[in-house]
Image (cartoon, helix red, strand yellow):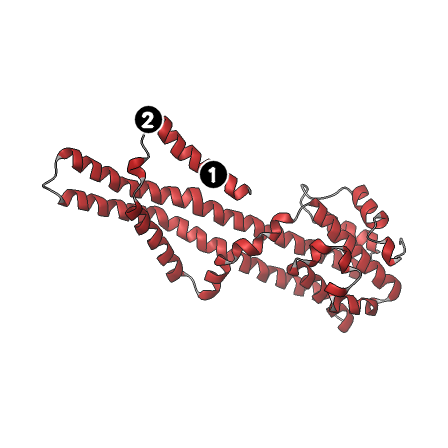
Amino acid sequence: MLIALGLTVVLLSVFGGFVLSGGSLGPLYQPTELLMIGGAGIGAFIAANNGKAIRATLGAVSRFKRSAKYDKALYMELMALMYTLLSKARREGMLALERDIDSPDESPVFSLYPRLVTDPMIIHFITDYLRLLISSAMQTHELDELMLHEIEEFEHEAHLPSDALYKVSDALPAFGIVAAVMGVVKALSSVDVGPDLMGQMIAHALVGTFLGIYLAYGVVAPLASRIDRQGAESVKMLQCIRVTLLASLQGMPPQLAVEFGRKALHTSERPSALELESYVRGGAAIAPLGLEKV
């Protein structure tokens, strides 16, 4: 929604301001200029990236749509889930979590948090490292290093689409100049036309420069920046899980472990300590499982 709103504001501001200043939109409609600039941008994008980067860019919108929902309510659900899992492990042992992490979709624990279950990134990260804790005797620093490595790799993959789009946005003004130069060449080669028609042809050619700059900084660069921001939201979610698990491994009780995770959140989504305590200890999510309030 914010992406569409922002692009609409840019569109109305630029073209609306042009109309209000007395300009006509007719001369700006140059489909051949748009074809040259857009086609060159797409071609350069394909030539500059491998299949992995192209697929990541094409799938960025659908993949990062989930991160737009990483709000305060979802983080509180995450904290409640981590509290529930860690409390169960503390009371019954880590092996008691084996059935839950093997089949999260059928687990009575995970089923209490349907928003989290629909996000494979979150579920896989939690279950993978709980499975490691059950099946191996990894030290805390070894597990931390492994989690940091995975988060770093996720950041790298998440940055591929935005990096590819930023490079396209850098090239579009140059492609606009190319289209404008070609238009000027066409105009100057038409020596048999009058000065009025010559002026129109040069004006149409200069539209290429405008379109290149507008598409670069009014459309493509904002989309790349938005993908970067949404990738950072996903990384913050993983960091929250990491900090919570590490605190638990270091002997912290569940309620203190989730407090460590709370501190890892941005202030805009971070619940207060009292809000979090009330949610994870007194919420309806814990009562059906009969978990003790430790």
Q: Quadrant of residue 39?
A: bottom left
Amino acid type indicated by mark 1? Thr
User: Mark 1 to mark 2: distance in Å?
Assistant: 21 Å
Q: Position of residue 151 (x, y in %)?
A: 62, 60
Q: Position of residue 29 (x, y in %)?
A: 31, 41
Q: Earlier in the sequence, mark 1 or mark 2?
A: 1
Residue 136 seen from this side: no
For mark 1, what is the residue?
8
| Mark 1 element type | helix
- Looking at the rendering, in which quadrant would you find the N terminus? top right
Amino acid type indicated by mark 2? Gly
Side (left or right) of 251 relative to 223: right
Q: Position of residue 98 (x, y in %)?
A: 79, 69
For mark 2, what is the residue?
22
Residue 75 seen from this side: yes
Q: Nearer the viewer, residue 293 or 22?
A: 22
Residue at screen point 56% across, 48% down: 229
Side (left or right) of 221 relative to 113: left
